[in-house]
Amino acid sequence: MNTDVLTFFELNYAPGRVCLVGSHDPLYELIRIAQSGLTIDGKPSKYNHAFLMSERRGSEQKIFILESDIHFSAKEFQIINGPQESLLEKWCLDSLDYACVLGMDLAAGEQRKVIEQAVDLTYDVRRRYPIAELFGTLWAIITKTMGKKNVFDDQYAIQCATMVRLCYQAINKDPLQGEIDDITNTSPERLAQSTRWTFRKEWKRM
């Protein structure tokens, strides 16, 4: 586990804040490369995944997160596909190159509503992580049609960055408000570019 990035997240923790991570593992690096058409310099995005900080729990006050992902556990003979609750430590990988925490000036009630929306999505058993929609978003990037609905849109499929955006829409603070991006084509890179965040801290592998 990358204890440096865990400490970074803990120092910048607040319920409802958004975390972005970027790993150089081959699969995640492909997602970063796929977002090259959205970056200002045309280089691969720093980030491949987005999630929300939730509560601290237990005697050790560990941070839980809410996210949309596909999680495989050979040890537990388990596959979780779609919105789920995880420990923050899941994304404190030794392969991380970048991490970022983003936030807005939210009242306590707004923080609760963001988390409540994320929990509602997490326990909606119809929801799943959309592999096809990843390719749909790549096509939208290539064809510059981010404002159109994802060509592989499924009403019950939800990408990681889409989940973040839906939760902030619940408090009428969509981080991409005013942008053309259809919610089905939301990406970690576009969340990173938003100027609506009032809190931003970044971590980079030294």
Image (tube, rainbow, N blue to C red):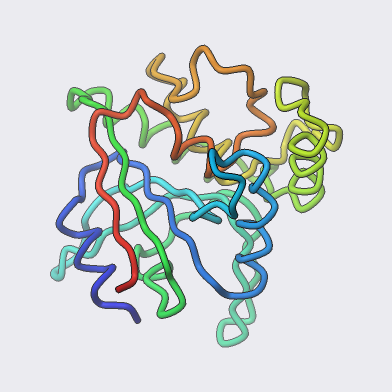
> Which residue shows up at 13% across the image and 69% down it?
59
Q: Could you tell me residue 17's position as x and y percent? A: 30, 41
Q: Is residue 13 above or below residue 109?
A: below
Q: Which quarter shows the N terminus?
A: bottom left
> Which residue shows up at 76% across the image and 44% down it?
138
Q: Could you tell me residue 44's position as x and y percent? A: 59, 55
Q: Is residue 124 above or below residue 111?
A: below
Q: Is residue 178 above or below residue 95?
A: above
Q: Horizontal placement of 67 versus 10: left or right?
A: right
Q: Horizontal placement of 119 versus 137: left or right?
A: left
Looking at this rendering, what residue extends furthest in the front direction?
A: 41
Q: Quadrant of residue 159?
A: top right
175 vs 57, nearest the viewer: 175
Q: Is residue 200 above or below residue 43?
A: above
35 vs 20, nearest the viewer: 35
Q: Horizontal placement of 74 versus 94: left or right?
A: right
